[in-house]
Structure formats: C-alpha cells, structure tokens
C-alpha cells in the first residue's frame, strides 16, 4: 500500500476542529440555542493552554469543562478559545487552543467528536509542570449566580452564559470521560486506511 504523503488523517482532524471552532464562535455571538450544551475535554499540558496553578495542579493531564448554565466572556479566535468559569466558587479564565481539545460533545443531540492526541504529548503548556499519560477528569463547576456574574477582577463583563454543575459522582457512576446519553462518536480512526 502506498504511503499517505498528503496526510488525510491530519486534514480530517483539522476540518473537525473547524466544526468545534464554528460552533463555539456562534455560541459566543448568539448564546446557546435551545437545549444545546457542550462538554469539552482538553489536555491541560498541551502547548498554549492557560490555567491557574491551582487548576493545573488539580488536573495535571486532562480535564473536561461543561458550557451550559454559567460561563462568561467566551471568545474564539482561529487557534483557541477563552472562557470564564467558576470552579468551587472561584472564578477562573481558561485559554484553550483547539489543538489541545481531545473531545467535543453536545449531549442534547447525541453529537460527539474525539480527536487523536497529537504526537507532542511530552510538550508542556505555558505554565505546566508536564505529565506523560493523559487521564480524563470531569470538572465540578459551581452554580452560584454570584460567581457567574462577577468576573475575577470585579469589573464589567459580558452577559453570563450557561455551564453545568456536575461531578463524576453526580452522573450515577458514569465514566468521567463520557458525556451522558447516547452519543454518536466520530473518531479520526474512522477516516484512516487500515494497513
């Protein structure tokens, strides 16, 4: 079999990340429509990820955030998105490059994308201690309205959006890396030719 010099697998993965980018950009402009909400897993040690030292210590490999009830200042660029969330009543701003995203789910419609980790697993983020083996975590977000409407600096902010309050225990023993409900998983492996 011929060698894939075009790297279709990389092209497909980039196209699927474009779907995530477009959906988040629309949510930043218009808010979340209907019952839509997002589970976004990402490698916390990937290049360009910005987290507080407290969050990086708690989630050194991978974590999942949920955009549903309360989040603020969602902004999207070609390469990353930034969002404000409250973690155990402490507001945080996260910057997440799209290359760091490992999974994007919208359980309201059973949509799920999984991304292969890039071969740079050994590389570290801007403020990371580094780690070798990623393991998914579901982050419990605080639902108190005061933290959803007050950014960390206490200044004026954009209207709050939605973000879920859940933990692995809240999900009745479900795997912390899985979104609830039946979801259709699209993996990059489905597009690869078997040799």
Image (tube, rainbow, N blue to C red):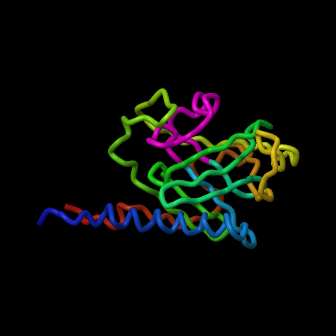
> Residue 104, relative to residue 52: is it above or below?
below
What is the x, y in percent for residue 103?
Answer: 51, 55
Q: Quadrant of the C terminus?
A: bottom left
Residue at 57% in and 54% down: 81
What is the x, y in percent for residue 170?
Answer: 74, 45
> Residue 171, relative to residue 191: is it above or below?
above
Q: Nearer the viewer, residue 106 or 128?
A: 128
> Residue 85, relative to residue 61: is it above or below?
below
Q: Nearer the viewer, residue 48 or 57?
A: 48
* Badge count: 0
Left or right: residue 128 versus residue 51 is: left
The quarter holding residue 37 reads bottom right
Q: Quadrant of the N terminus?
A: bottom left
Of all residues, the one furthest to the left in this rendering is: 1
Residue at 52% in and 54% down: 80
Q: Nearer the viewer, residue 94 or 116?
A: 94
Left or right: residue 108 versus residue 189 is: right
In the image, the segment drawn in magenta is: 42-64
Residue 44 painted magenta: yes
Residue at 76% in and 58% down: 162
Residue 132 painted magenta: no
Of all residues, the one furthest to the front in this rendering is: 155
What is the x, y in percent for residue 41?
Answer: 55, 49
What is the x, y in percent for residue 89?
Answer: 80, 37
Residue at 44% in and 30% down: 131
Left or right: residue 13 versus residue 136 is: left
Left or right: residue 95 versus residue 125 is: right
């Amino acid at each position: 079999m011929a060698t894939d010099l075009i790297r279709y697998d990389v092209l497909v993965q980039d196209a699927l990340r474009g779907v995530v980018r477009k959906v988040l950009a629309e949510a930043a402009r218009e808010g979340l429509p209907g019952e839509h909400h997002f589970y976004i897993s990402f490698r916390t040690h990937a290049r360009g990820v910005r987290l507080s030292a407290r969050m990086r210590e708690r989630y050194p490999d991978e974590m999942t955030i949920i955009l549903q009830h309360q989040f603020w200042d969602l902004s999207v660029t070609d390469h990353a998105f930034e969002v404000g969330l409250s973690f155990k009543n402490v507001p945080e701003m996260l910057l997440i490059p799209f290359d760091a995203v490992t999974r994007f789910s919208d359980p309201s419609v059973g949509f799920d994308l999984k991304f292969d980790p890039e071969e740079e697993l050994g590389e570290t983020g801007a403020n990371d201690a580094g780690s070798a083996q990623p393991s998914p975590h579901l982050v419990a977000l605080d639902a108190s309205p005061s933290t959803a409407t007050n950014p960390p600096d206490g200044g004026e902010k954009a209207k709050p959006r939605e973000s879920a309050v859940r933990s692995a225990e809240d999900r009745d023993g479900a795997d912390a890396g899985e979104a609830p409900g039946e979801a259709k998983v699209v993996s990059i492996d489905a597009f690869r030719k078997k040799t």
